[in-house]
Image (cartoon, helix red, strand yellow):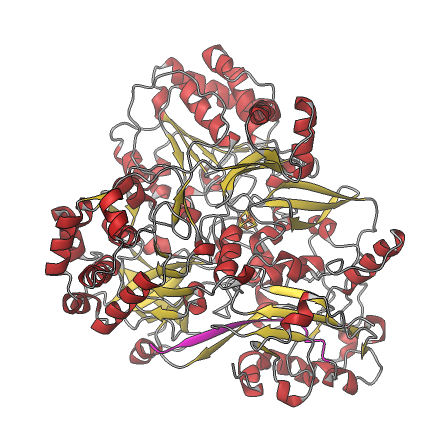
């Protein structure tokens, strides 16, 4: 790799030179009284679990006289083995965020007026209990909904149980960035509901269809570790990665090859690859005869219709490309095809590649572990007759707005920010009479609440997170590394107190004195199972010793029971409906008025977290584009030239749904008829490092729901772009 | 005498920036904010630098994590009029803040642009001061700073080994960036110890150093991608 001095100066030199030629007098900078660091003292390392995403990495916090000064990875955790990602490292900026909500708040002005009054916990809890009881007494408890950030552990079970006891079917889990894989296809084609595990470290070839594989995937640190092994770590042979996507992402940069592909043609491209594999008889005959059905019909349609020349017409890629990739994919086994969580039929077409070469249910392929996890709080028995208001969180706003099938009386929001990341929730929220937020941060969603009952941050909380690795299942135990700094309260405790206040059946079905009791109740059950405490294999006597050891080591692990992959159903990939969908491609607006596709890409530093008020992450948004503290739109230089747009210009990006202003950044890594904007900025929270920083590209998405999966399609919106001054 | 060396395997590196943030937290790096960032005054001892080659569609990019190279023949120390930056006995280029007069000669002499000037007294919101690492001093305005290979960790590791009555062992001392690397792409150790991992890795045919041709003798090695 030739890196010349000129390369350096081109890329990084400007800042350094500016710094040396500045003409300000030195004396102006001399010590104005430097900041003193609080003194050293007694040091403790306390194990817990990261809370910046749902990955479940074990952490150890360095605590000195009650101050937390560093977070490291817990070396005993099988998830992350002592390492952490950038978000995990930035965790102290969550705890010490100067703009945290410090006590329960009641809104005193209009919604959105940001006028609040601090109230006591008894008052806050009493009021929620009374409102919910009122709704129950009217016999309409189903009109209470809760949206919860996905948390894979006891807290999720507790909230679910609370909603059941209340009599509402409306408990929604926020879609998780880390689930950005073909889960819908897997569940439809194989009838499997559990989380699939992509055995990346043992694969030799990976075909990524726009997957944010090394940005934010499954359990991100674990995935990165597996990626390191895939690249020849642990003495294995180096695996090859091909990334197919309209934008050159970090995964694309790190890939051995980037194949730019027109948005919405992934499915057809995958079928083209399948065509070649079938035609050249490169598929796994044994797997297909023993684990699949419908292959003959699939084969017939593929051979007839998805020829390289047809695929080339749709995708604009050279025929040779398809043939070459197909041959590589089929010959470097074990190989993996990974889809983004896009349209169901595209996911299915891509996933069928895994079935063709038998990469299902085996090492180096997709592994299925038995679900559910090894422990659970017993769910309450109550049967709920009503149907949920909406089948998917993405269609929730529409249901609320139309009051169909019914309206909502109350909405409870825990550990997520739906007004930022679900479409049209602002408008929908206006029709809900009572909104309660448990957010510790004044984010876009909390600002519309009537009451805020602020949670602690994760470093002040109890909890547990269930995760899977290729070797087994792990439960990381979150314990407070310090006492709550402010007058905040763990939401688990708040829910239990609300239940107690409401009395009756609800109180009876939530019998624990505190969330910690509920947590320990479920942790104690682990002792009867076959696993072990992190770092200790045997020799623990009694329940208390077992619990103590778990807290000291940070968690519990057990080997997996592997689930046999369900029979793989090829029929559906080429069903008439699917074929129609492939043909249709993407809708999303008139090509003449809106000639470009809008692509929204993820930033590893801004995924999976509910609070974006973290300055270290704002400074280092993403490594490939030298931008910080603002959003940008990436434009191919040719496209920019034709419109007279250069890097740094303010431009308007406009769709049928609206327009946003932001800075242009010419980028060679984007297709000429696509522009791309990162997701994660423009969160209208009040934190000082959030406020007025960037824009949210989802505000101009033309709402497009993939009916069979209920997913929001994020890459179908068409836009035009022009200079803001022109 | 030990010779501390870092090796970064670019093939395993995912450019996730965990190293960047770990360094900032560990070393009390001030928060720049939008305005200072715009003025290019942001401080990042460890930084990922993007290089772009070619044009669409034949574009290639490289993402290079760049700490201080801890040159064995450092151009920066030679231009310092007050010996505020100098090569330490174990090969770490030191930055002695009380001596620094802020002339910034070293900043421009460094071919790798790793030196940063403190234009202001760094400040943190009161609430955040509790997160400062007591092992690392906060630099005053008017001095130059850079990556130290987390030398405070070496001191602590030495003290600990001495208290336990033993020699320093491989792995006792690693910088914060290396410790946190999720894909295990970073290695650190003593290249004089023939049993260390780094002494093996730097002999790899994939190993190279940045701008080797200008004779700075960096002690940060990279392993090239794609092989
Ligand atoms: S991957 Fe998720 S859980 Fe692990 S350190 Fe990063 S943010 Fe935390």
Q: Nearer the viewer, residue A464 or A121?
A: A464
Q: Nearer the viewer, residue B176 or A505?
A: B176
The magenta-colored residue range is: B56-71
Residue A649 locus on image (x, y percent): 41, 74
**In the displayed structure, would residue A697 be above or below residue A76?**
below
Name the quarter where the C terminus of chain A is drawn: bottom left
Q: Nearer the viewer, residue A104 or B41?
A: B41
**In the displayed structure, would residue B194 be above or below residue B103?**
above
The residue located at (65%, 33%) in the rendering is A550
The residue located at (31%, 79%) in the rendering is A638
Does A77 sit left or right of B156 as displayed? Answer: left
Quadrant in which residue A17 is drawn: bottom right
Does A379 sit left or right of A14 as displayed? Answer: left
The residue located at (33%, 40%) in the rendering is A565
Residue A497 locus on image (x, y percent): 56, 21
Q: Residue furthest front?
A: A286
Residue B195 locus on image (x, y percent): 72, 66
**In the displayed structure, would residue A616 be above or below residue A471?**
below
Q: In the image, is residue A328 part of the stretch drawn in magenta?
A: no
Regarding residue B137, the answer to whether it shows in the image is no
Q: Nearer the viewer, residue A356 or A455?
A: A356
Residue A700 locus on image (x, y percent): 32, 55
């Amino acid at each position: 790799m030739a890196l010349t001095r000129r390369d350096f100066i081109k890329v990084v030199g400007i800042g350094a030179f500016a710094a040396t030629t500045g003409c300000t007098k030195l004396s102006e900078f001399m010590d104005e009284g430097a900041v003193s660091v609080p003194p050293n003292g007694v040091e403790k390392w306390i194990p817990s679990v990261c809370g910046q995403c749902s990955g479940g990495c074990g952490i150890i916090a360095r605590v000195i006289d009650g101050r937390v000064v560093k977070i490291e990875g817990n070396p005993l955790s099988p998830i992350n083995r002592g390492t952490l990602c950038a978000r995990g490292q930035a965790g102290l900026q969550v705890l010490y965020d100067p703009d945290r909500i410090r006590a329960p708040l009641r809104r005193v002005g209009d919604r959105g007026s940001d006028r609040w009054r601090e109230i006591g916990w008894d008052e806050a809890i009493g009021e929620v209990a009374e409102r919910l009881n009122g709704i129950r007494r009217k016999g309409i408890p189903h009109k209470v909904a809760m949206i919860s950030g996905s948390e894979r552990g006891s807290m999720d079970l507790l909230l679910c149980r609370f909603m059941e006891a209340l009599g509402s079917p409306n408990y929604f889990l926020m879609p998780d960035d880390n689930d950005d894989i073909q889960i819908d296809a897997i569940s439809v084609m194989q009838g499997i509901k559990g989380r699939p595990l992509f055995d990346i470290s043992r694969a030799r070839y990976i075909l990524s269809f726009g997957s944010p594989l090394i940005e934010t995937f499954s359990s991100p640190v674990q995935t990165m570790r597996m990626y390191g092994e895939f690249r020849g770590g642990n003495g294995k042979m180096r695996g090859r990665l091909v990334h197919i996507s309209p934008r050159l992402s970090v995964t694309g940069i790190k890939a051995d090859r980037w194949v730019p592909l027109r948005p919405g043609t992934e499915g057809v491209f995958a079928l083209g690859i399948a065509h070649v594999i079938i035609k050249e008889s490169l598929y796994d005959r044994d797997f297909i005869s023993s684990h699949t059905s419908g292959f003959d019909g699939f084969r017939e349609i593929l051979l007839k219709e998805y020829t390289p020349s047809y695929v080339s017409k749709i995708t604009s890629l050279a025929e040779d490309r398809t043939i070459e990739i197909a041959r590589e994919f089929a010959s470097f086994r074990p190989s993996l095809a990974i889809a983004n969580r896009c349209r169901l039929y595209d996911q299915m077409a891509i996933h069928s590649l895994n079935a063709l070469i038998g990469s299902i249910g085996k090492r180096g392929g997709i592994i299925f572990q038995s679900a559910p996890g090894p422990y659970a709080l017993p769910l309450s028995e109550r049967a709920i007759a009503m149907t949920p208001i909406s089948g998917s969180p993405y269609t929730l706003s529409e249901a609320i707005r139309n009051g169909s099938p019914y309206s909502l009386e109350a909405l409870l929001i825990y550990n997520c920010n739906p007004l930022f990341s679900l479409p049209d929730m602002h408008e929908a929220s206006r029709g809900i009479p009572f909104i309660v937020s448990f957010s510790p941060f004044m984010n876009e969603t909390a600002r519309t609440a009537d009451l805020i009952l602020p949670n602690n941050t994760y470093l002040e909380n109890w909890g547990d997170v269930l995760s899977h690795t290729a070797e087994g299942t792990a439960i990381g135990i979150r314990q407070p590394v310090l006492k709550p700094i402010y007058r905040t309260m763990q939401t688990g405790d708040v829910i239990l107190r609300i239940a107690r206040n409401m009395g009756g059946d609800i109180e009876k079905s939530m019998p624990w004195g505190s969330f910690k009791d509920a947590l320990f109740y479920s942790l104690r059950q682990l002792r009867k199972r076959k696993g072990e405490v992190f770092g200790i294999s045997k020799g623990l006597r009694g329940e208390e010793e077992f619990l103590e050891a778990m807290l000291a080591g940070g968690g519990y692990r057990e080997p997996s029971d592997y689930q046999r992959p369900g029979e793989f159903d090829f029929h559906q990939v080429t069903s008439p409906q699917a074929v129609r969908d492939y043909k249709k491609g993407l809708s999303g607006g008139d090509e003449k008025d809106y000639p470009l596709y809008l692509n929204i890409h993820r930033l590893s530093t801004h995924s999976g977290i509910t609070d974006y008020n973290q300055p270290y992450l704002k400074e280092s948004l993403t490594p490939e584009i030298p931008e910080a503290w603002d959003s940008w739109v990436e434009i191919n230089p040719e496209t920019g030239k034709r419109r007279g747009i250069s890097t740094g210009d303010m431009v308007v990006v406009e769709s049928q749904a609206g327009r946003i202003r932001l800075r242009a950044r010419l980028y060679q890594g984007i297709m000429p008829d696509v522009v791309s904007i990162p997701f994660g900025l423009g969160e209208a929270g009040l934190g000082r490092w959030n406020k007025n920083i960037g824009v949210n590209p989802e505000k101009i998405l033309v709402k497009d729901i993939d009916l069979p999966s209920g997913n929001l399609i994020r890459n179908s919106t068409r836009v035009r772009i022009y200079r803001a001054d022109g | 005498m030990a010779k501390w060396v870092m090796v970064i395997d670019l093939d395993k590196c995912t450019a996730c920036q965990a190293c960047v943030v770990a360094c900032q937290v560990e070393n009390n790096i001030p928060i720049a904010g939008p305005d200072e960032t715009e003025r290019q005054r942001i401080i990042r001892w460890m930084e990922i630098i993007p290089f772009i080659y070619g044009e669409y569609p034949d574009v290639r990019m490289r993402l290079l994590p760049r700490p201080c190279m801890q040159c064995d023949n450092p151009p920066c120390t030679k231009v310092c009029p007050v010996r505020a930056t100098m090569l330490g006995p174990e090969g770490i280029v030191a930055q002695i803040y009380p001596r620094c007069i802020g002339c910034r000669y070293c900043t421009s002499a460094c071919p790798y642009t790793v030196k940063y000037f403190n234009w202001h007294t760094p400040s943190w919101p009161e609430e955040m001061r509790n997160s400062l690492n007591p092992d690392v001093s906060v630099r005053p305005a008017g001095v130059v700073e850079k990556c130290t290979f987390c030398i405070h960790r070496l001191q602590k590791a030495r003290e600990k080994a001495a208290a336990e009555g033993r020699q320093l062992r491989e792995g006792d001392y690693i910088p914060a960036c290396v410790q946190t690397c999720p894909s295990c792409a970073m290695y650190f150790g003593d290249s004089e110890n023939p049993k260390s991992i780094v002494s093996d890795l730097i002999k790899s045919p994939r190993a190279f150093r940045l701008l080797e041709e200008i004779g700075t003798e960096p002690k940060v090695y990279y392993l090239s991608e794609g092989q």
